[in-house]
Image (cartoon, coloured by chain):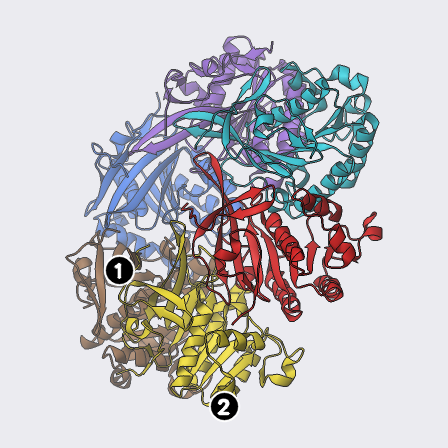
Chain colours: A cyan, B purple, C blue, D brown, E yellow, F red
Amino acid sequence: MMKRVLTHIPGLDEILHGGIPERNVVLVSGGPGTGKTILSQQFLWNGLQHDEAGIYVALEEHPVQIRQNMLQFGWDVKPYEERGTFALVDAFTAGIGKAREYEKYIVADLNDVRELTDVLSQAIRDISASRVVVDSVTSLYINKPALARGIILQLKRVLAGLGCTTLFVSQISVGERGFGGPGVEHGVDGIVRLDLDEIQGELKRSLIVWKMRGTSHSMKRHPFDITEKGIVVRAKEVLGL
Amino acid sequence: MMKRVLTHIPGLDEILHGGIPERNVVLVSGGPGTGKTILSQQFLWNGLQHDEAGIYVALEEHPVQIRQNMLQFGWDVKPYEERGTFALVDAFTAGIGKAREYEKYIVADLNDVRELTDVLSQAIRDISASRVVVDSVTSLYINKPALARGIILQLKRVLAGLGCTTLFVSQISVGERGFGGPGVEHGVDGIVRLDLDEIQGELKRSLIVWKMRGTSHSMKRHPFDITEKGIVVRAKEVLGL
Amino acid sequence: MMKRVLTHIPGLDEILHGGIPERNVVLVSGGPGTGKTILSQQFLWNGLQHDEAGIYVALEEHPVQIRQNMLQFGWDVKPYEERGTFALVDAFTAGIGKAREYEKYIVADLNDVRELTDVLSQAIRDISASRVVVDSVTSLYINKPALARGIILQLKRVLAGLGCTTLFVSQISVGERGFGGPGVEHGVDGIVRLDLDEIQGELKRSLIVWKMRGTSHSMKRHPFDITEKGIVVRAKEVLGL
Amino acid sequence: MMKRVLTHIPGLDEILHGGIPERNVVLVSGGPGTGKTILSQQFLWNGLQHDEAGIYVALEEHPVQIRQNMLQFGWDVKPYEERGTFALVDAFTAGIGKAREYEKYIVADLNDVRELTDVLSQAIRDISASRVVVDSVTSLYINKPALARGIILQLKRVLAGLGCTTLFVSQISVGERGFGGPGVEHGVDGIVRLDLDEIQGELKRSLIVWKMRGTSHSMKRHPFDITEKGIVVRAKEVLGL
Amino acid sequence: MMKRVLTHIPGLDEILHGGIPERNVVLVSGGPGTGKTILSQQFLWNGLQHDEAGIYVALEEHPVQIRQNMLQFGWDVKPYEERGTFALVDAFTAGIGKAREYEKYIVADLNDVRELTDVLSQAIRDISASRVVVDSVTSLYINKPALARGIILQLKRVLAGLGCTTLFVSQISVGERGFGGPGVEHGVDGIVRLDLDEIQGELKRSLIVWKMRGTSHSMKRHPFDITEKGIVVRAKEVLGL
Amino acid sequence: MMKRVLTHIPGLDEILHGGIPERNVVLVSGGPGTGKTILSQQFLWNGLQHDEAGIYVALEEHPVQIRQNMLQFGWDVKPYEERGTFALVDAFTAGIGKAREYEKYIVADLNDVRELTDVLSQAIRDISASRVVVDSVTSLYINKPALARGIILQLKRVLAGLGCTTLFVSQISVGERGFGGPGVEHGVDGIVRLDLDEIQGELKRSLIVWKMRGTSHSMKRHPFDITEKGIVVRAKEVLGL
């Protein structure tokens, strides 16, 4: 039987029939404001609470800001960074400004995915990470969609090779039906889609597991809430759009 | 707890569950005639009434015209400019004509976002501004969409770094579903969308807060009016399109 | 209070809550056969009847043909041209043929918007024009949409600077939802859209004021007719498409 | 009052409230199989029966084939060619093959619209033509849409200058809403659209006059039939799609 | 009266009010799996049974495979090839492999439509063919749509000149509304569209004659079946999608 | 009568009225998560159980991962590889890493389809394979769609020539109507489409046989399940979307 990595996000493991199969690379796909980043950070934080080291690759936001944002949900990663069970890979500042002093893992040139995988591999080995989040993979190919599939496969090869279970945040536009392009969707082991839909003048949050290699899973769309403590999935409810 | 910046726009702070979280960069997105500029100017004017200095970056309209337009709502910024609590950054005239004599902050070359951020930073420091409006960010990348994300991030870094709470006006086409392109939508901390919809031969105004980092907010679409004193949001009502 | 320019088109001033605010640049946008040109010529003719000098910039049709077309509605501009209160800027013939002899204001090279604004400025000063029509602005950027916004702003600057109230005719395709492209729609002070819709096998004419800086206006879609004397708007009626 | 050119096509003049205003250039626009060519040839043939000379500019079909096709409806143009009241401008064969011997008016290079207008002008003068058909104008710019407007205006100038009333056949795709592109639609004096729609498994023919400068016209969609004697419009009936 | 070529396909001649007018070039247009090739081969086979020689131009499939496919419906063309009343033009193998030995008519370079028309003309003269199928014309311009119209006209000129009645197979995508592009649709004498539609979970076959020069025809959509003996059209039934 | 290859996938042979006609090349087309890979691997595994040798061409996933994935359904291909009745062509690793040691059939350069067909031909001859899966053909032309048709035809020629019955996995986007592009859809002998549709908040799996040369087949959409033992098609049920 396949080993599972529990997200410990209320309702989500139930929907996944017991968590994410180990080593899977899962696309967390959604439009702006759908909660992709919160879900991903919660996945890492919950790992830390269960002695599973994790890495957050920051491509969209300043590392300082990310730590502050997590703090708002009560997720203080600083002690874990000191203890060596959490690491933040700074692929945002390019080492400019004070980041050079404070950040341990810096990717200088984002046009070279090689450097990213090198720095990430080092970080994974350093802290024996079993969970990784890349937020977002979209940044890596936003202006060069023809390269998307290659980049996804390159990252996946490294991460699966090192035994990590990974979330790839994929940014899509409002109203877009797919999950981030054909090369990306077919290249990953799982897809979790987060949605924010306006229904009769009201915004509704929901998620659906579109595919997950190595396990059966709920085939339904479930509503979820973003609370002060993070995401809570209503696994017993179904939202029919 | 997170500090808030009150818009003092009737109904809007209620919808935002207490105002905009400090330092957030918020996209004010809408089609032509939806009231984006009015909302943004009202945000600045209301700040002035509460001793919060503000800056308006003018990319779409002549500075003289902007002051006149504001005057129509009774918002006379001249005294505040003299007093040093309001500043207008002229990124429209390129310093041609009489603007060179009258305007203090002029951006000569709009193709160099660097110059814009330099002039803007100087203005913010000069008057200790806590509120900024950029009207519109769309002008900065209208003919080079591939650069949109980079420009948004560059501006955001400077503005958040200087402690400002900012509105980015984003112009979209009639009938367009998004908020100004994927790179822009995912790069900001909040999105407020203004709509003007024809329903049964009648135009209806409404707004919806699509996302706002650091706070919960109304998840509903609210009608609003443009009155002689500016925008009034009907926070108790919902418009189901 | 803002000064108004009356269109004297039956029903239209009522819809505009008292006419077009002075110096506004208004987009008159519509598909083929919707009546854009007639509305614009009627606006000029009505001005002439009230001692307001006007200029028609002809980009789509031969000046001779334009005078003939106007004549069909009983609008004989010849006497006004002689008297010096009406002028036609010929941006159509490039001065080829007999136009060189008969036309006073000729724009030779349409690829140079500079020349157009120079000739137009001269004409405005010569006859102290307060009303201007550019039919159509679309011609100026039909094959170079990236330049649309810049051209609109350049024209607007000159016209508002000279104190004119202006209509820009914008040609759109049948079924197109916008008003002529994002750069154009957001750059003008007002938008009046003319529509011709097939409903149950019958063509229906209607117009709607989408935005108008400096005034409130009807928020409804009104049917209108093209009569032998020009356009008549049924300001009391609403057409729900 | 404006002079009219009668089409003598049953039902069509009634719909046009008395025929096509003289010198108008009218777009006859429709998808494949809608009857554009038949309507245009019938317009010319009916002119011949009323002593009005006509010219057919053939861009889509071999001149020999065109004469044969017309013959199927009983329209034998040969005697009229001999008598000098009908002419066919061959803009199809480029003078290759036997066409060089048999055709009087040949356009050798279709990429040079100048040659076309020269040959056409000559033919018009030779036979004192008052009716012209260009079938199709689409051929002239199918692979260079940016030139469409210029070509339409150039042709229109010549034809109106010579006093002709003209039909321009415009080919559009099935399901396309417009009439052949914005530059074309706005450049002509009138638009007649022919449609062939599948309704409940049955094809229905109809036409609608979308615009016609210089006259009022039916604002309704009328069914029509293609009979052995050509097109018959049911002017009393309306088809609501 | 016009001469007709009978398809002898059950139901189809009835729909065509007596067969295809002689020398017509007819587009047989449809998505994958709709039966275009079967209909075309059946047209040729039925001709052979009535002493009308025919030619199949093979652009999509190996000649050997084509003969085998026809055999499955009981259509054994070998004896007719030997007898000189059927010919296969191999525009697939480019003469590579054993084709060079076995095939009599080979087109080596498909980028030169000239060679195709030369080989085809020769074959038509050799066997005095009156029926021709080109399967598919789409192959000739799939990567160069701007050339489609020219290629269609060039082929049509040769085929009509030699007195053949021809089917052009046109491949379209599932869900595409047209028949293969504007240049193609307007260039042919007739269009027969084959459809395969999923209705309530079931695939339904139907065809509709969209246009046919020189004859009236059924204006209805008819269901058809692919049986062991080829296509059978249900001319008495109508399918309303 | 035509020979058949049985898939032995529960329900599928029934739908195909007796299996896939021998030598057919069948497109297995579907969006992410629809089960294309599982169906293809099951087809090969079932062949092995009936002494039919098979080859899997791996373009999307590491060979090691593929063997593991198959193992999850109880399909252990190792013994068959040793016995010489199953082979995996590694067109994924390019021979980098340990693959060079462990994999027998490696394609180094995917831009040269020639090398792929050479290696594949060798493998087919070595183990006398009668079943082949290429997962996916999409990878071969994802960034060069103009080449798709040529690549499909080249592969098909080789595979049919060697007597194999083949499945081509075709990856399409969510919401895409076609099967992988016109050049691909028309080039294959059969199309089986797998779908995953959200209906009222629930994901539903179904498949439909769109075309299959050489046999009649069910014309209905059938639901199917992915069980622990692979795909089970409910051949008696119909899903009307």
Read off the chain for label 2: E
Kindly identify which residue carries mark 2. Answer: E84
In the image, what residue occupies the spot 63% across and 20% down? B123
Q: How many marks?
A: 2
Would residue C150 appear left or right of D137 to someone viewing this image? right
**Crowd around label 1: few <14 · some 14–19 · many ≥20 (10 Å):** some
Residue F50: x and y in percent read 64, 58
Q: Which residue is mark 1?
A: D204
Nearest the viewer among C56 and F240 is F240
> In the image shown, does C42 or E36 lie closer to the viewer?
E36
Quarter where residue D193 is shown? bottom left
- The chain carrying label 1 is D
Residue at the far left: name it. D236
Task: Say what secondary structure mark 2 lies in.
Answer: loop
Residue B88 placed where, x, y %? 56, 22
Instruction: Specify whether F100 is left or right of E137.
Output: right
Residue B99 position, x and y percent, is 56, 28
Depicted F87 relative to depicted E147: above or below: above
